[in-house]
Image (cartoon, helix red, strand yellow):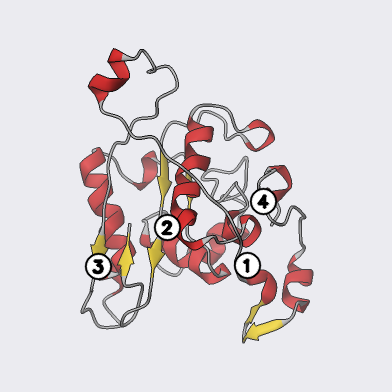
Amino acid sequence: HWHSQWNPFAQYRHSMTVEEVLADKMIAWPITRSMCAPMTDGACALVVASDSFVRQHSIGGRAVRIRGMGVSSSSDRSELEISRHLTRVAAFRAYEMAAAGPSDISLAELHDASAIAEILHMENCGFCEYGQGGPLVASGATRLGGKLPINVSGGLHSKGHPIGATGAIQVHDLVRQLRGEAGESQVQNARMGLAENGGGFLGHEEAAAT
């Protein structure tokens, strides 16, 4: 919510204190309304081109390279096999393709349909040990200006959740950052970004993750 102040495309653009969030309308204990992403309208288009096309049309100055991608679905893991969570599998497939790791990421846009999802997925993406997502947020590391800014767009909580467009908008927000065009919410020296998105529900987690 704090990051949303600088996103002109966010549905809600006001900061909230911890006390205000906890005092909001209860949805399903302990999740309050302010911990949930609102449904919204929205659209986003991404232009993806090959290296040869970029060179041919001399548009490399603003192009952002896709270093790696990872997809996973239909896990049959037990609830205790957290290292096989779909998001973790997809993230480390992307890291392998990119010849990179969690420590190389400058900023991330994570699928925070609920507040706990952001914390779970920062753990799944390897940004901290399992169980340490809460302390990482509390330390200020994930804020703008911190060691690993997360959801500096305001996340789904503030932008809204237009379902099919949600993942594309995450990529759009990262591209603006990597181009140095994010204005007041610019992450300094942003070199590599990660977008994480999941959908559906099957067993212990999402039905699919990217």
Q: Which residue is mark 4?
A: 10
Q: What amino acid does circle 1 point to?
A: Pro
Please say if 9 is above or below 183.
Answer: below
Mark 1 or mark 4: whose residue is earlier in sequence: 4
Residue 138 position, x and y percent, is 62, 60
Single out the mark in the foreground, 2 or 3.
3
Please say if 122 is above or below 32.
Answer: above
How far is the residue under mark 3 from the one under mark 4? 30 Å
How far is the residue under mark 2 from the one under mark 4? 28 Å
Q: Are marks 1 and 3 in contact (CB under 8 Å)?
A: no
Mark 1 or mark 3: whose residue is earlier in sequence: 1
Q: Mark 3 Cα within 10 Å, few/some/many (few <14, many 20+)?
A: some
Residue 129 visible somewhere in the drawing: no
Q: Which residue is mark 1?
A: 38
Residue 22 position, x and y percent, is 73, 76
How far is the residue under mark 1 from the one under mark 3? 25 Å
Q: Secondary structure at mark 4?
A: loop
**Residue shown at 31%/83% (left/top)?**
203
Residue 128, disc: 2
Q: Mark 4 Cα within 10 Å, few/some/many (few <14, many 20+)?
A: many
**Residue shown at 43%/31% (left/top)?**
191
Q: Are marks 2 and 1 in contact (CB under 8 Å)?
A: no
Q: What amino acid does circle 2 point to?
A: Cys
Q: What amino acid does circle 4 point to?
A: Ala
Q: Which residue is mark 3?
A: 73
Please identify the quadrant where the N terminus is shown. Answer: bottom right
Q: Are marks 2 and 4 in contact (CB under 8 Å)?
A: no
Residue 207 position, x and y percent, is 31, 72
Single out the mark in the foreground, 2 or 1.
1
Mark 3 or mark 4: whose residue is earlier in sequence: 4
